[in-house]
Amino acid sequence: MYKLVIFDLDGTLVNSIFDLGDSVNAVLEAHGLMTYGYEDYKHFVGNGTRKLIERALPQDMRNDETIDSFHSQFALQYQKRCLDKTRPYEGIPAVLDELRQLGIKTAVASNKPDEFSRFIVKNIFGDGCFDIVIGKREDRPTKPDPAIINDILTALGTDPSQAVIAGDSDVDVFTAHNAGLKCIGCEWGFRGRQELENAGADFIIGSPKEMTALII
């Protein structure tokens, strides 16, 4: 039995693609730039919101100054609408309840900025649902660097052999393996089964209800 499950946030616990896409599109539209559909954004997300902005900008505008400016504008837009359409995936609340009843710790490790990660988790799942929530911090690199995972393991006093990561993209698989953990690939998220297989996910499940059997 694993003693700790570390969840990715976007595309794993919650479907946030609509609010993310709407927020970026609002900034792009304000500058007269081309906007994108939600399917495009599924491939833009995963490496943090700054990288999201970089990918959405035209190639000739991808310099640090422009990315920083657009990222600041995005943060203002996302702050206003980050809970408009974002919802937990069907079956996720039940799995979280079941894990708590089994005495298994849960955590969130996200490349979304820390303040947004905490705000969304608190407002969707409530206080105390997770033992710890950590998003992107200035003093830590983004996943797939294992720093955020190591911080969680240390904070919760858990050995890597007793923990598993659940996520929807190759970033989560690489993060898990870089930290010495196994990864449960969640194919209901943004990227799908093929990417998870190609990245070498240790397990792949098609719905949240399949997760508990792997944990225990």
Image (tube, helix red, strand yellow):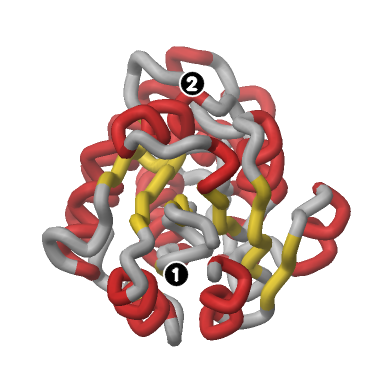
Asked whether, in this view, residue 45 is left or right of residue 30, the answer is: right
Can you see residue 70?
A: no
Query: Residue 56 appears at what percent x and percent y?
Result: 57, 42
In the picture provided, is 63 more to the left or to the right than 127?
right
Residue nearest the observer in this picture, 83 or 30: 83
Q: Quadrant of the C terminus?
A: bottom right
In this figure, which residue is indicated by the disc labeled 2? 141
Residue 216 drawn above or below residue 90: above
Residue visible at 42% across and 44% down?
109
Placement of 20 over or under 136, stated as above or below: below
Relative vertical location of residue 91 with respect to residue 139 in this rendering, above or below: below
- The front one of 210 and 31 is 210
- Pointer 1: what residue? 15
Front position in the image: 24 or 97: 97
Considering depth in this image, is 28 or 208 the residue closer to the camera?
208
Q: Secondary structure at mark 2?
A: loop
